[in-house]
Amino acid sequence: MDGVINVYKPEGITSFDVVWKIRKLAHTKKVGHTGTLDPAAAGVLPICIGKGTKIVDYIMNGSKEYKTLLRLGVITDTYDREGKIISESDVNLTEEEVTQVIKGFIGEIAQIPPMYSALKVNGVRLYELARKGIEIERKERKITIFDIEILEIKLPYVSFIVKCSKGTYIRSLCYDIGEQLKCGGAMWALERIKTSIFEVENSIPLDALTEDNIVNNIISIEDALGDYPILILDGTLKKQLLNGVSIYDKEVTDQLKEDQVYRVFFKDNEFFGLGSLYKSGFKMKKLLFQE
């Protein structure tokens, strides 16, 4: 049983709880998730099984989409509704002022991760320090907000969809919006509606999975990597690539871009793995073919 299941995680459980249930249903310990969702959040959580665990990082590298509810006029220690309220204030703003500030976050921005996060600093997860009342300085990280679609403004609440890069903390985004509006803000609800090629419309609720239907809901490894373009090669190059040798054939390399990962197939439709163009030529990054 190798591949990926597009699971819809409900609120109230951890991402590891989902992994635990899938392990039980699939009768295997080789299961991993592709990006933590907080217990209070719901949404798309692709689960990799068997050899599918080899592509966890490649799925996580894809862009994300979140539907969130921001509450203005409140600041909590966790930047969301689960935390302790630090301060509250009136929200005397127009819809135009709110819209202008939120839209101003589109583009590449610097973001400071929240203390209540799974990010590790010196081998310790930040939330472990936060629970002890310890706050440390966190480095800014460059992230990209591709787009923000505002769905509804009913102050002090604002509902919107964020399309963003890997590593974006929506809680931090909500906090930063509140800071710019000078009234404070916290994330009040969160649903991940897309990650990489996995969309909420095609997900299966965790509770709907059973031992009998789990196999029918597995997406193949090559299809799960649908974000990456296809490169079809001649079978004569297979041995070189298998032995870790770089290919510097202009018929191959001239059509490729550096820093791009490709799904490699041979002309007999055999899926081989993932590869990239380097200065030394084209080389495999991850062998995924079925022997």
Image: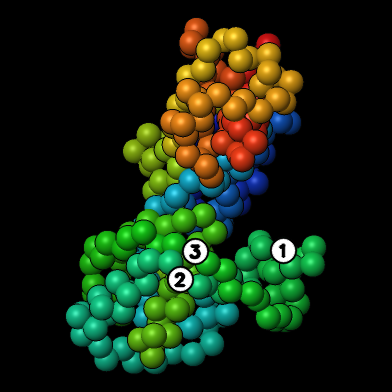
Mark 3 sits on what residue?
A: 143
Q: Nearer the viewer, mark 1 or mark 3?
A: 3
- Answer yes or no: do the residues labelled 1 and 3 have beta carbons within 8 Å? no
As displayed, is residue 201 above or below residue 92?
above
- Answer yes or no: do the residues labelled 2 and 3 have beta carbons within 8 Å? yes
Percent position (x, y) of residue 74?
A: 43, 84
* Closer-to-camera residue (204/222): 222
Mark 2 sits on what residue?
A: 109
> What's the amino acid at mark 1?
Lys
The answer, for residue 266, to whether it is visible in the render is yes
Whichever of callouts 2 and 1 sits on the residue coming sooner in the sequence is 2
- Is 192 displayed left or right of 39 in the figure? left
- Is 27 displayed left or right of 215 in the figure? right
- Check the picture and name the quadrant holding the N terminus: top right
Farthest-out residue, right: 123
Label 1 sits on a secondary structure element that is strand
- Is 136 displayed left or right of 271 in the figure? right
Whichever of callouts 1 and 3 sits on the residue coming sooner in the sequence is 1
Calculate the distance from the C-alpha at mark 2 to the C-alpha at mark 3: 6 Å
* Closer-to-camera residue (28/148): 148
Residue in the image at 48% along x and 23% along y? 251
> What's the amino acid at mark 2?
Ile
User: Mark number for residue 70?
Assistant: none
Calculate the distance from the C-alpha at mark 1 to the C-alpha at mark 3: 18 Å
Farthest-out residue, top: 268
Mark 1 sits on what residue?
A: 120
